Amino acid sequence: MATLFIYKMSDQLDMFLFDENGILSMPKLTETMEQRISPNQNGLISGEGFTNITTFVYDNVHCLECYCTTESSLGYYYQARLEQGNVTAEKVQHSYFSKSNVKLTSDGNLIIKFDWTSEEKAKSRVKEMIQSIGVELESFKITDGMLRHIQGQYHWTSAKIDQIFKVGDKTKKVSYTIDPSDTDSRSLVDEEYKDHGNMCHLAFEMPFDYEHRHRDTPSLINVKLYREGGHRIVINEDEFGNNGDLNIFQIYLMNELLKIKNESDGM
């Protein structure tokens, strides 16, 4: 499972990053990132930075993709030492470098993708590093209104409602699923509680009718949205027939969610 976090770039951008037409320039972004290339020793990442910087075009929008490497810590330990016949202990921090995948678009949107849950704790540092190239980022927030809008427009399979307040009912939160093969049935739990709390999770199927989709990539992709835990978006990379479809779907999904957000409750 991969976790996505969406951001929008604010108007506070370094003017150097724009071309003569006032469009965010992929070559200038690439040049700036190449000045902060991740160092490595025989292939082992040994510092923070950006690497594997490439560009592509989707739906007439120019996109930049790269990896961002950041330093993380597993905490401290005490290393035994022998000095002049005396055994001592030295407090040492155990650190390592993790990676995240970053996609930026010329229309000012950004995706940070983590392949493992343990990598997500680097999110704040990744955001700081991206902002260091001259952009300000605003987090995309998943809301109750947005989730309910999606529930009404797409085939959904599971949901969670919290902050429930219903007279005579002590239930505070409830999670429920429906049979994904039964598109006609309704959830009795959903009908009972949907108007008495805030929706904080929804799993649904996003249509993916990409013209050049690989034959092994389905036309419906499972997506999970979590308002809790930092507005997380989760997809299963194993559903995709190749990396090209995976990359394109992330941009497509982001555009659709931004559109839904604007339709339901504004950004």
Image (spheres, helix red, strand yellow):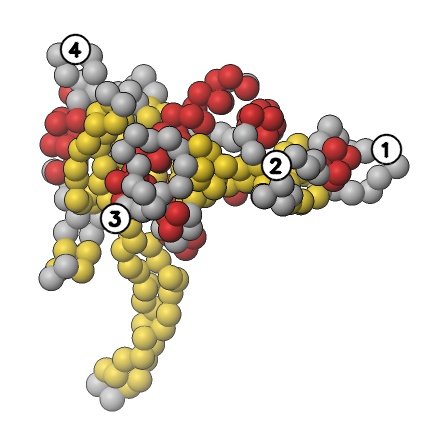
Query: Looking at the picture, which amino acid does disc 3 mark?
Result: Thr
- Near mark 3 (Cα within 10 A), the count class, few <14, some 14-19 or many ≥20, is many
Q: Horizontal and vertical percent for residue 43?
A: 14, 59
Q: CA distance from mark 3 to mark 2?
A: 43 Å
Q: CA distance from mark 4 to mark 1?
A: 59 Å
The mark closer to the camera, 3 or 1, is 1
In what element is the residue under mark 1?
loop
Relative height, residue 134 to residue 171 (above, below)? above
Q: Is residue 224 left or right of residue 68?
A: right
The mark closer to the camera, 4 or 3, is 4
Q: Residue 167 has which mark? A: 1
Q: Residue 21 has which mark? A: 4
Of marks 3 and 2, which one's residue comes earlier in the chain?
Answer: 3
Q: Report whether residue 193 is seen.
A: no
Q: Horizontal and vertical percent for residue 266?
A: 50, 17
Q: Which quarter of the picture shows residue 33? A: top left
- Near mark 2 (Cα within 10 A), the count class, few <14, some 14-19 or many ≥20, is few
In what element is the residue under mark 4?
loop
Point 68% across, 37% down: residue: 185
Q: Residue 69 has which mark? A: 3
Q: Nearer the viewer, residue 135 or 84?
A: 135
Of marks 4 and 3, which one's residue comes earlier in the chain?
Answer: 4
Q: CA distance from mark 2 to mark 1?
A: 31 Å
